[in-house]
Image (cartoon, rainbow, N blue to C red):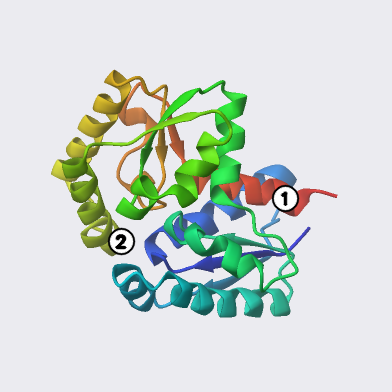
């Protein structure tokens, strides 16, 4: 079994989900008392979020690359960045490593293709929804990406940072997210990517008939498969 490096803490709420899902996946595959071989680096999210706010992405990449290199030096065979947004600096981090990064968008694209999705809605932070580092990767695979309107993007971003990252799950926020999902469906989306690792804490597949693609779950399942490959 390969050792999985988790670059987490962004936020720690969703990193808990990664740890749980990956261990469950390994145990389901191997049975008994088997669990995942994991090295975890959990960063101080306030520092990273401040760099996001001030558009200092390169600086945030330097910080994360330092943690990633420590995971590699500690024996990790591959790396997961446990957040969608910070994949903006994934190329910068990869430059400092000899081990591969399992990219969260690539893992998601694989599932979209398996299900024949041609038009997908995307929810996430304002950075993930509006910038090209994530969307363009999907578009290049001939999948159209739909995002909410500007007002919805602002409210979604606020809910993520001021509620979900703090572990607060509010009924009114859940209702709003589901309204946005319905709107994306009416605009032609065949499903919706939960493109922020905290969103899956708030809404689940049982809440809607439209297929939801939970990136935390997809990324974790990809890590299990990679850890068990020969």
The outermost residue toward the left is: 172
Name the quarter where the N terminus is drawn. bottom right
Q: Nearer the viewer, residue 164 or 20?
A: 164
Residue placed at 22% from the left, 41% from the top?
174
Residue placed at 60% from the left, 43% from the top?
107
Q: CB of mark 1 within 8 Å of CB of mark 2? A: no
Q: Nearer the viewer, residue 97 or 111?
A: 97
How many neighbours does mark 1 have within 10 angstroms: few (below 14), some (14-19), or many (20 or more)? some
Task: Residue 96: tell me if it is visible.
Answer: yes
| Residue under numbered circle 1 | 226
Label 1, secondary structure: give it. helix
Structural distance between the alpha carbons of marks 1 and 2: 28 Å
Please state the horizontal and vertical placement of residue 193, each as a whole percent of the image. 42, 37
Please state the horizontal and vertical placement of residue 139, each as a whole percent of the image. 51, 35
Q: Earlier in the sequence, mark 1 or mark 2?
A: 2
| Residue under numbered circle 2 | 165
Tell me which corner region of the image, top left, top right, bottom left or bottom right, holds residue 34: bottom right
Residue placed at 39% from the left, 50% from the top?
131
213 to the left or right of 26: left
111 to the left or right of 160: right
Tell me which corner region of the image, top left, top right, bottom left or bottom right, holds residue 80: bottom right
Please state the horizontal and vertical placement of residue 166, each as a whole percent of the image. 27, 64
Please state the horizontal and vertical placement of residue 59, each as a whole percent of the image. 45, 77
- The total number of labels drawn is 2
Q: Nearer the viewer, residue 73 or 33?
A: 73
């Amino acid at each position: 079994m390969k050792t999985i490096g988790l670059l987490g803490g962004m936020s720690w709420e969703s990193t808990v989900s990664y740890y749980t899902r990956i261990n469950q996946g390994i145990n389901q595959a191997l049975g008994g008392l088997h669990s995942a071989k994991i090295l975890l680096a959990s960063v101080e999210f306030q520092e990273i979020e401040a760099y996001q706010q001030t558009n200092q992405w390169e600086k945030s990449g330097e910080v994360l690359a330092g943690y990633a290199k420590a995971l590699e030096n500690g024996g990790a065979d591959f790396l997961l960045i446990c957040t969608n947004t910070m994949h903006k600096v994934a190329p910068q981090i990869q430059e400092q490593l000899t081990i591969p990064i399992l990219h969260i968008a690539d893992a998601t694209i694989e599932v979209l293709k398996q299900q024949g999705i041609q038009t997908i809605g995307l929810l996430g932070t304002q950075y993930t929804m509006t910038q090209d580092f994530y969307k363009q990767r999907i578009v290049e695979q001939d999948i159209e990406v739909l995002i909410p309107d500007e007002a919805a993007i602002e409210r979604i971003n606020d809910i993520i940072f001021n509620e979900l990252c703090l572990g607060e799950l509010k009924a009114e926020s859940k209702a709003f997210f589901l309204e946005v999902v319905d709107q994306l469906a009416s605009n032609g989306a065949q499903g919706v990517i939960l493109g922020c690792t905290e969103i899956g804490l708030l809404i689940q597949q049982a809440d809607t008939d439209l297929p939801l693609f939970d990136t935390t779950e997809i990324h974790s399942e990809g890590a299990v498969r990679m850890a068990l490959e020969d």
